[in-house]
């Protein structure tokens, strides 16, 4: 994805997905997995996580992913004639 976008965003927001978060501790802190920490260090971005139990944040995030996919990652559809 980063190659396609020709760069890495400064900050990426994630859901509390298990490949990234081992444990959510008080005050919103997370213990991240070693693999996720290496991924972040390799690409050099900051990360944020959605608050647990906040469905509105997750829904907004998923809507943004859908917007980017539909507007930037899918090929354009070309029509020769709309009326045939």
Image: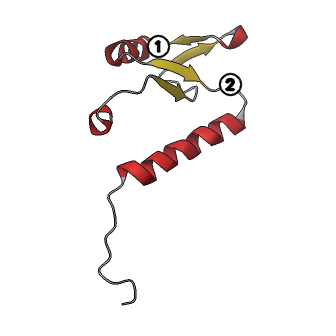
Q: In this view, does 15 lie above or below 20?
A: below
**Display colour scheme:** secondary structure
**Residue wearing tag 1:** 33
Question: Quick one: SS at disc 1?
Answer: loop
User: What residue appears at the point 63 percent right and 27 percent down from the top-left corner?
Assistant: 50
Q: Is residue 27 above or below residue 48?
A: above
Circle 2 packing at 10 Å, graded few (<14), some (14-19), many (20+), is: some
**Residue wearing tag 2:** 51
Cα–Cα gap, marks 1 and 2: 18 Å
Disc ID at residue 83: none
Circle 1 packing at 10 Å, graded few (<14), some (14-19), many (20+), is: some
Q: Closest to the observer: 31 or 62? A: 62
Q: Is residue 40 above or below residue 17?
A: above
Question: Quick one: SS at disc 2?
Answer: loop
User: What residue appears at the point 34 percent right and 19 percent down from the top-left corner?
Assistant: 43
Task: Report the quarter where the C terminus lies.
Answer: bottom left
Q: Quadrant of residue 35?
A: top left
Q: Quadrant of residue 28?
A: top right
Q: Quadrant of residue 37?
A: top left
Residue 29 x/y as whole percent: 63, 10
Q: Nearer the viewer, mark 1 or mark 2?
A: 2
Residue 49 x/y as whole percent: 59, 23
């Amino acid at each position: 994805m980063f190659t396609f976008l020709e760069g890495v965003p400064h900050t990426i927001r994630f859901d509390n997905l298990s490949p990234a978060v081992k444990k959510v501790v008080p005050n919103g802190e997370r213990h991240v997995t070693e693999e996720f920490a290496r991924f972040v260090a390799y690409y050099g971005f900051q990360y944020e996580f959605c608050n647990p139990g906040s469905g509105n944040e997750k829904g907004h995030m998923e809507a943004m992913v859908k917007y980017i996919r539909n507007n930037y990652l899918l090929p354009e559809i070309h029509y020769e004639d709309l009326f045939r």
